[in-house]
Image: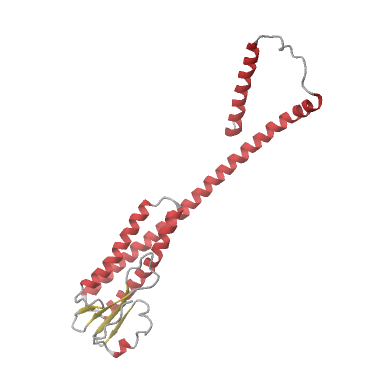
Amino acid sequence: MSKLPSSWALPTTIKNRLGQRSAGKQRAMVAEGHLLLVLHAAPQAQDSERRAVFFWRSPSGQWQSSGGQYGLKPLIKHLQAYSDAENTLSDAYAQAQTAADFFQLLETMAPLRRASENLYSTLQAAREGIPDDPDLIDLRDWADEINRSLALLYESTSNAMNYSIARRAEEQTELSLAALGASDRLNIIAALFLPITALASIFGMNLISGLETVSGLAFWSVLILGMMLGIGVRHWVLKGR
């Protein structure tokens, strides 16, 4: 975690608002013309802790960052990291297909979305504390665009995941209804042939039918007829027609 540089000539009222264990939440502190921004780096999926970055604007309008750089460029780079992360998530959203993909995307997006909301709130507070700095207006508006894009992306991803789950549930319901219909038709067939099967089991089927003395053509005719009946029964069981 970044430390507040000891060389910064910040007012005591600002230094006293910083904790000893951590930098705390993102916020803007203004006192005696000084502005201190406590921001968090754009969170990554594997990050377990918030990485704080400090930006100091002196009363003369000069900027410094806790990374040892001067000017406004480090703060612009900080916001660009949020914008790049949002673009990466947008590309992942375009490629997601299953509910698991959308859920994983939401898990990655949630901390970035919260951080972007706090980033915008911090820059808005800085804009109100230093109202005559046009750079803060541009940075605040940029942070607002990033926050709005992430909010829309989060909502779209959540809707897509819910739709995917609902569609899968609907498909499962249709398959269950089809299986239930096939089972009903099989039960009908079983009911039709149950009496014949019972009688054949009790009395046997060794009856003289007259087909014992005919040529083998009758056997093949009966076989083909049975196969055709089997195909018809199968179609009726599976299709319901």
Query: x%, y% of residue 103?
Result: 44, 58
- Name the residue at 28% across, 66% down: 81
Q: Residue furthest right?
A: 203
Which quarter shows the C terminus? top right
- Name the residue at 60% across, 18% down: 224
- Name the residue at 66% across, 9% down: 215
Query: x%, y% of residue 36?
Result: 28, 81
* Location of residue 68 with respect to 172 vertically, above or below: below
Q: Is residue 142 left or right of residue 111?
A: left
Seen from the viewer's position, the closer of residues 75 and 163 is 75
- Name the residue at 62% across, 28% down: 233
Which quarter shows the N terminus? bottom left
User: How many numbered discs sit on the rendered protein?
Assistant: 0
* Location of residue 119 with respect to 202 vertically, above or below: below
Q: Quadrant of residue 10?
A: bottom left
Seen from the viewer's position, the closer of residues 49 and 81 is 49
Query: x%, y% of residue 29?
Result: 31, 82
Q: Quadrant of residue 12?
A: bottom left
Query: x%, y% of residue 104?
Result: 42, 58
